[in-house]
Image: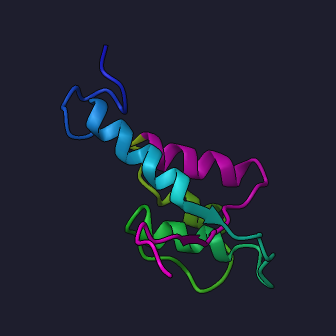
Amino acid sequence: MAKGHGCGCRRCCGAVGVQRVLRFQRRFSVLPLVPPEDPSEGDRELMRLGLQLAAPESALDDEDLARIPQDTSLQRAFVTHLRSGRHWHTRTGILRSELAWG
C-alpha cells in the first residue's frame, strides 16, 4: 500500500517521498507561538494563502464565511473551524542546514 497522501506516485508517496518528509521534520524546529494582537490575523492569512481568496481587513464574520466555496475539504475545514469559535494560527520555525559548519 502506498504511503503519503495516497496518490501512489513514487515521488511523494513512495519511500523516497516519505524519507524527504522525515528529513525535513528532523531539521525543522517550530518556534513558540506568540499570540497576535488580533486573534483573527491567522484566519485572514490562511484565507489569503491557503484558500487563495481575498480576505477582509477585519475579523471574518458570518457573511464572509458564507461566501467561501465549500468545494474542497480544506475549504470546509476552514469554515467549520471558525464557526466553532476557534481561530487559525500562523507559525514559524527554523530550518537547520544540513551543511557541517566549523
Q: Is residue 79 left or right of residue 83?
A: left
Residue drawn where x is 31% and y is 26% of the image: 6
Quarter of the figure with the N terminus? top left
- Stretch of the chain drawn in magenta: 73-102
In the figure, is residue 41 to the left or right of 38?
left
In this view, the residue in front, 16 or 2, is: 16
Q: Residue at x 56, y 44 (%)?
A: 77
Residue 87 is situated, as x and y percent measured from the top left of the image, at: 72, 61
Q: Nearer the viewer, residue 96 or 85?
A: 96
Is residue 19 positioned above or below 38 on the image?
Answer: above
Q: Which is more toward the observer, 83 or 21? A: 21
Residue 13: quarter of image:
top left
Give coordinates of residue 86: x percent, y percent: 76, 55
Where's residue 93, x and y in %? 60, 71
Using the image as rendered, state which of residue 15 and residue 51 is in the foreground: 15
What is the total number of numbered labels drawn onto the structure image? 0
Q: Is residue 24 left or right of residue 56?
A: left
Above or below, comparing residue 82 to residue 38 in the picture: above
In the rendered image of this protein, does residue 28 appear above or below residue 76? below
What residue is shown at x 54% (from left), y 52% (from top)?
Answer: 26
